Image (tube, rainbow, N blue to C red):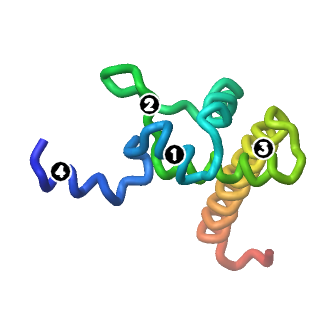
Amino acid sequence: MTADDSYGRLDDDDYPAYTMGRAAEMLGTTQGFLRAIGEARLITPLRSEGGHRRYSRYQLRIAARARELVDNGTPIEAACRIIILEDQLEEAQRINAEHRRAAESANPTAAP
């Protein structure tokens, strides 16, 4: 990998750039919290060659949402389920919008 390739990954939300310790520090939480949301299968960190957990920015955003819910009194298992359901809803709405646009372009004279 060249230096140019490495710099290109700085903008990649899915690149596992953060160690567990750094991720916990950034989120203001514990490493145990990150382990717990991993065990609940909310996020699955990648593993380094040495077996250490590595987190992406995308995963940190999900973990931050989980922490927000837990900080407001939601049990961790419920928080993880809520986030999964929110993600599924967002995906379903995106798919519905795509179908709506496709239907409108196939029949532009139809009223909504």
Percent of width and height locating residue 18: 42, 44
The answer to the question of whether label 3 and label 4 lie on touching residues, with beta carbons closer than 8 A, is: no
| Numbered disc 1: secondary structure | helix
User: Distance from label 3 to label 1 (Cα)?
Assistant: 24 Å
The numbered mark, 2 or 1, whose residue comes first in the sequence reads 1
Q: Amino acid at mark 2?
A: Leu
User: Distance from label 3 to label 4 (Cα)?
Assistant: 35 Å
User: Distance from label 2 to label 1 (Cα)?
Assistant: 13 Å
User: What residue is drawn where x is 76% and y is 50%?
Assistant: 86
Q: Residues within 10 Å of mark 3 (few under 14, many from 20)?
A: few
Q: Nearer the viewer, mark 2 or mark 1?
A: 1
Q: Residue at label 2?
A: 46
Q: Nearer the viewer, mark 2 or mark 3?
A: 2
The numbered mark, 1 or 4, whose residue comes first in the sequence reads 4
Percent of width and height locating residue 11: 35, 59
Q: Residues within 10 Å of mark 2 (few under 14, many from 20)?
A: some
User: What residue is drawn where x is 79% and y is 78%?
Assistant: 111
Q: Amino acid at mark 4?
A: Asp
Towards the viewer: 32 or 105: 32
Q: Residue at label 3?
A: 85
Q: Amino acid at mark 3?
A: Leu
| Numbered disc 2: secondary structure | strand
Q: Amino acid at mark 1?
A: Ala
Q: Residue at label 4?
A: 5
Q: Residue at label 1?
A: 23
The answer to the question of whether label 2 and label 4 lie on touching residues, with beta carbons closer than 8 A, is: no
Percent of width and height locating residue 45: 50, 32
User: What residue is drawn where x is 61% and y is 63%?
Assistant: 102
